[in-house]
Image (spheres, grey):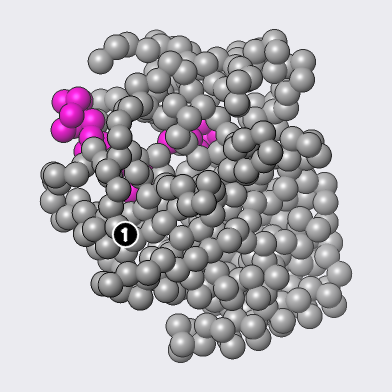
Amino acid sequence: MKRIDKLDVLIGEKQVGTLAETKDGLAAFQYSDQWLSAGYALNPFSLPLAKKVFLPNYDPFEGIFGVFADSLPDGWGRLLVDRYLKKTLKVNVDEISNFYRLTFVSDAGMGALSYQPSQMLESHVMPYDYDTIALECKKLLEQDTVGNLDELFLLGGSSGGARPKILTEIDSESWIIKFPSSYDDLDIGLQEYEYSLCAKACGLEMSETRLFASKECAGYFGTKRFDRRQTSSGKQRIHMVSLSGMLETSHRIPNMDYNQLMRLTMLLTNDMREVEKMFSFMCFNVFAHNRDDHSKNVSFLYDEQQQRWKMAPVYDLTYSNSIGGEHATTIDGEGKRPGMENILSVAKKAAMDCKRAKIRAAEIRDIVRECLGKYLG
């Protein structure tokens, strides 16, 4: 493998800046003059738009800034990449840096950022039906090797999240289709689809979702990617940063509270409507028992036309638990049994109209009970 110690960071054809690996294993970053004159901060907190060299801490992303860590595969995607590196390139994955991993991202990562030069695979992916892909995913989770590893790597090697998934094109639009993991119920796809319909009924902003047919289960959940947009001039990539990346904190350690999320949303967007979106998201998670609400499951998008940040559509909604059965993000300090009192305390601290907040919370509670009662017991 060729040694790469510098990477150009791009959005479309524009060079945003350069990443360079230091002797200490840190990925230093500097904005390009072009981007400084007409661009925006990739992260207004840790990477403000300024002519200087930015150096990250080693933790929590092993020497890279959170916005670049968001480009890396996580969970299922990382498993695929590690299996591929070990099998095909004979690489010891325990000894490689996150900077090195970025050389395999190219333009396949989540969000708008791409990286050059790249060591990404170029190959033709054979078409498979979804049941066959689900079976191949199951085999990969159960054993160290699988016959179609290269194809699975190309289909899902840049994805995040724990569940097996593929990134695909449907009617010229970019979609994510998920498959059961080894610890999921076989009909997890149907559950996530019904959760998505309920979220939309509650008025939460969510990308288009579908349940794709299967002969083996109730169906596979799919959602159209909100970090891609089809325009008259082609596909536009949208800059996205997770809460984890924005605050430079690991999603694997529960350390957030919705009071912080509400304050961050106002600080970032300066828009009470966005704060109200976060409030609705919190209410849904409480009443629908979606407790895996960690900092990778919340993201923000940058709207280049309006030159402002906004909350991304919600995603990864299911009946779920986090560590100890508590919410990964606490509600006014309560993670195990949050109730209306905790919810309204968050609203009050965010300077929301408490009467309106109570009505909104009760509305979401009632819709969730009606739509998802069979899951909630």
Judged left or right of residue 226, residue 223 is: left
Task: Tell me if residue 75 is in the magenta stretch.
Answer: yes
Vertical side of 254 occupied by 231: above or below: above
Q: Residue at x 50, y 40 (%)?
A: 110
Quadrant assignment, res 134: bottom left
| Few, some or many residues within 10 Å of mark 1 (<14, 14–19, 20+) | many
**161 within the magenta span:** no
Residue 271 on image: x %, y %: 83, 51
In the image: residue 370, left or right of residue 74: right
Residue named by callout 1:
130
Task: Give, as a three-letter code, the residue at label 1.
Answer: Tyr
Q: Residue at x 31, y 59 (%)?
A: 130
Q: Give the extent of the magenta segment.
A: 66-92
Vertical order, 63 against 20 (above or below): below
The secondary structure that dominates the magenta segment is helix
278 with respect to 102 (left or right): right
Q: Residue at x 42, y 30 (%)?
A: 105
